[in-house]
Image (cartoon, rainbow, N blue to C red):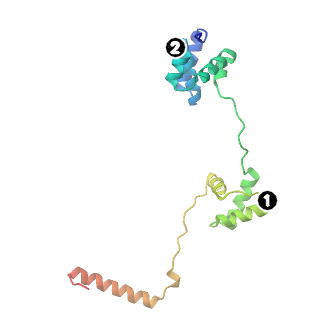
Amino acid sequence: MKKRFVAPLTEPEQQTLTSAYHHGEKRALRRRAHAILLSDQGHTINQISEILQVRRDAVSRWFKQWEVSGFDGLIDKPRSGRTPALDEHNHKRLQALVAEHPHQIRALQARFQEETGKSVATVTLRRALKKNGYSFKRIRHSLKTQRDETDFRKTQDLMKALHEREGQGARG
């Protein structure tokens, strides 16, 4: 099999690739720059694929991209992704609904679906609200208003007396 290498690099190309290899923002770019530099040093495609732990055809593809487009060929092109479930208008509507149902994410979800016709998961609503500075904490429920004060005071007095007896060494 014929050994394939990239064409010898010029000094500016070496500097650009070395900079990308050491300081590149994305891991993929650093890896591709490293592959081109290794090829320039005389490593074969098989050796480079072993060093970088990638498939041989990936290294070959990087070489082709380098030869056709230069450094720009090593940079990932923008790809389309899923469109956001909530646009800017929906974010504003969601914030208005939070004022009505601040502690009830399911009620918020139902109301949001009624008004917009969009079925959105509660996780998505939480993520959107968190992005806008909201936080989620468990509501503390208190039974203080439902207790009988006389029984409560009697129990408190009994507990106090038992603690005092325990401190004196007496048993129940």
- Type of amino acid at the residue the image marks with label 1: Gly
Residue 117 tag number: 1
- Residue 10 in view (yes/no): yes
- What element does badge 1 sit on? loop
- Residue 25 in view (yes/no): no
Tag 2 residue: 43
In the rendered image of this protein, does residue 150 appear above or below residue 47?
Answer: below
The residue at 66%/19% (across/down) is: 65
Residue 17 placement (x, y as % from top left): 57, 18
Quadrant location of the C terminus?
bottom left
The residue at 72%/37% (across/down) is: 80
Viewer-proximal residue, 170 or 55? 55
Residue 134 placement (x, y as % from top left): 61, 57
Q: Nearer the viewer, mark 2 or mark 1?
A: 2
- Type of amino acid at the residue the image marks with label 2: His
In the rendered image of this protein, does residue 144 appear above or below residue 54?
Answer: below
Viewer-proximal residue, 104 or 144? 104
Q: How many C-alpha atoms fall within 10 Å of the one at disc 1: few (<14), some, or many (≥20)?
A: few
Q: Is residue 18 left or right of residue 66?
A: left
Residue 131 placement (x, y as % from top left): 63, 51
Q: Is residue 156 left or right of residue 67?
A: left
Q: Looking at this view, name the residue that lies furthest to the left.
A: 169
